[in-house]
Amino acid sequence: MATTTEAEQVTPVGEDSSWYERLKHNRNWLGFLFMVPAAAILLVFLAYPLGLGVWLGFTDVKVGRPGQFVGFDNYAWLLEDDVFWLSVFNTFLYTVVASIFKFAIGLWLAVLLNRHMPFKSFLRAIVLLPFIVPTVLSALAFWWIYDSQDSVISWTLIEMGLIERPIDFLGDPNNARASVIVANIWRGIPFVAITLLAGLQTISPSLYEAATIDGANEWQRFWRITLPLLTPIIAVVMTFSVLFTFTDFQLIWVMTRGGPINATHLMATLSYQRAIIGGSLGEGAAIATAMIPFLLAAILFSYFGLQRRKWQQGGVDD
Amino acid sequence: MASVDIRNVRKSFGTTEVLHGIDVSVPDQSFTVLVGPSGCGKSTLLRMIAGLEEISSGDIEIGGRVVNKMPPKQRDIAMVFQNYALYPHMKVFDNMAFSLKLAKVAPDLINRKVSEAAEVLNLTEYLDRYPRQLSGGQRQRVAMGRAIVRDPQVFLFDEPLSNLDAKLRVQMRTEIKELHQRLSSTSIYVTHDQIEAMTMADQIVVMRDGIIEQIGAPLELYDRPHNTFVAGFIGSPAMNIIQGRMRLEDGKASFQVNDEIEMPLDEARGVANGADVLLGVRPEHWTFTNGQAGVPLDVSVVEPTGADTLVVCKLDGHEVLASFKERYEFAPGERIRLTPSPGNIHLFDAATRERL
Ligand SMILES: Nc1ncnc2c1ncn2[C@@H]1O[C@H](COP(=O)(O)OP(=O)(O)OP(=O)(O)O)[C@@H](O)[C@H]1O
Ligand SMILES: [Mg+2]
């Protein structure tokens, strides 16, 4: 506030010339001014597309043809649409199963990598690999691994005499679901593992020593020290992981395009298929918009349920 | 309760040996302090007793049992860490109850033990708080509480007070000592602070660079340090060590600083005439003679602390410290004469730096 008074003393405040001068020194106005660029960017690049998408969901716009407002018609149709409901089921199955495995394997890897062992940094780099490879490339690799004739897995199993003919990984609905989930897990583990590893490294080794002296075995140290201290980070990591999985598109699109018989269609792929391939922008947008409540729920759940712990609050020191 | 015996214990990290054969015997119910400069291996030795570090060679016995291969849990020890190592996600009560819960002690017994310990440590009203919500001193007490609920045979402390401010440190020092007298449990306490060692210990172990320099009761170390290292380490301000030469004449021994300055000694302690020796006098053992007798010193700085007057002087170009109960008002540059009080002169071999 000191600046305001100084400015007023320096500049004699006239009746008419003053509005600009006054604005120039008004805290709120200046604050607003400084916020404008950021707000504009957010509005133009985040809110506008989102708003546009939601709006499209209420119209019958087709590619190349302007449509008109149709209210909830798109949603009404979707409610009747078995393929839509199948995609919702698939999305949940995909997200839940993949997230559970990513969490379990990621945490296990993080704990292993946190141990003192030879070639530690080399192993950590290896774990990051699936993350570094472009998604499309890894999807193609899986596509080849899952090939109905030349799959390495089938080939190995046949050579070992365990099966007689190649497994139809992507041709059978349930096989296809399992296959894309496995691919997603493979792709998602590095993020979970490396982030949890970073979390593990913030836990002071003396806590483990104290627990050892208190009589805790390795298992008890994990359950009573590691896991509770890691929950805030687990919450953040798993929120992101769930969001990424729920909205996954690339892996599925490259490997199955949602087939066979829509068995691997997720909401994202179905939306794309209807909107861009099928040209029904309005319907596609409605499917995509339908994902928003689930995503919001996931975020709120982690924010309120897991992230903030009482023992992290209070006390200003250290 | 139990005694702890450490016999010819060595420790190497990779190829570097950091403990070179340690022998200490900690009597039952004693309060033994391991003291020494940073990096001398005190923590390493303590952690070996706790079972947190492997023993490279030698034996550690607790209560007559060799514990070399025993996991910490079975050693019946408790340890207080320098950073307290409180479990941040557990309330004070659960921090203290953790070991008992793991040992499947009955809940009402846990309750009783924890509240007893909390009472002793004045923690009763904080049992429901998280460690973050406590002050440094309170956290320190929780760490102690966690140790005492277990009723262990041996308490191990690794610099438990070094994170506290000076005043609190003095207060906690007393509390730990009181607690020890009350529980009369064997305690091994690591510190690099010689005052802590002097005030708390029954027995002090002075270490340097992985070896033991001297073991003894506090006043024994103060009165008869075995070498110049212990002489300089124990006591504050540190002992003055003055270089000079032994002179024997007509059966009378004296210590020669240079051609002019000489101090009479009561005996030669087996030193040959002309041999190089080091003479040690504690600052508090100088007496101001107010006359012609004594060593001439040039005052450079006078530091009154209220209780004592510290006088920094120069003797033949070397700094010498004197501390008086009296409030002398010397002027800088003034020449004064001091004599060491009888029976408080220490002599050390100039080459081996061992006591003569
Ligand atoms: N895990 C380790 N690996 C290698 N060297 C170590 C390890 N732990 C300790 N050392 C070395 O052993 C020596 C003794 O260390 P220690 O921690 O016992 O010292 P200290 O006497 O407790 O010192 P301080 O007063 O600073 O705590 C040091 O030189 C240290 O560098
Ligand atoms: Mg130490």
Image: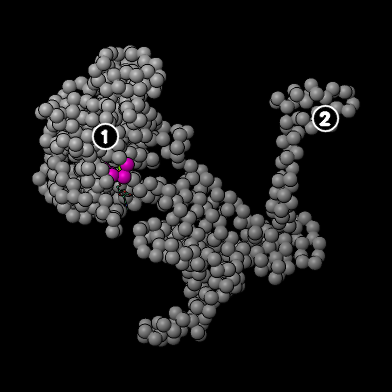
Does any atom of ligand 1 lie closer than 8 Å to the CB of label 2?
no
Q: Position of residue B11 (x, y in %)?
A: 23, 52
Does any atom of ligand 1 lie closer than 8 Å to the CB of label 1?
no
Residue at 39%, 41% in the rendered image: B89
Is B42 contained in the magenta span?
A: yes
10 Å crowding of disc 2: few (<14), some (14-19), many (20+): some
For mark 2, give the secondary structure.
helix
Residue at 22%, 22% in the rendered image: B340
Residue at the spot of label 2: A21
Is B80 contained in the magenta span?
A: no
10 Å crowding of disc 1: few (<14), some (14-19), many (20+): some
Question: Residue B200 lies in what quarter of the image?
Answer: top left
Residue at the spot of label 1: B243
In-image side of A37 versus B312 (left or right): right
For mark 1, give the secondary structure.
strand
Question: Residue B29 lies in what quarter of the image?
Answer: top left
Does A277 sit above or below residue A92?
Answer: below
Q: How many marks?
A: 2
Quarter of the rendering occupied by the N terminus of chain A: top right
In-image side of A295 versus A274 (left or right): left
Q: Position of residue A99 (x, y in %)?
A: 48, 59
- Identify the amino acid type marked 1: Gln
- Identify the amino acid type marked 2: Glu
The reply to whether residue A238 is visible in this rendering is yes
- Span shown in magenta: B38-43
Q: Position of residue B234 (x, y in %)?
A: 25, 32
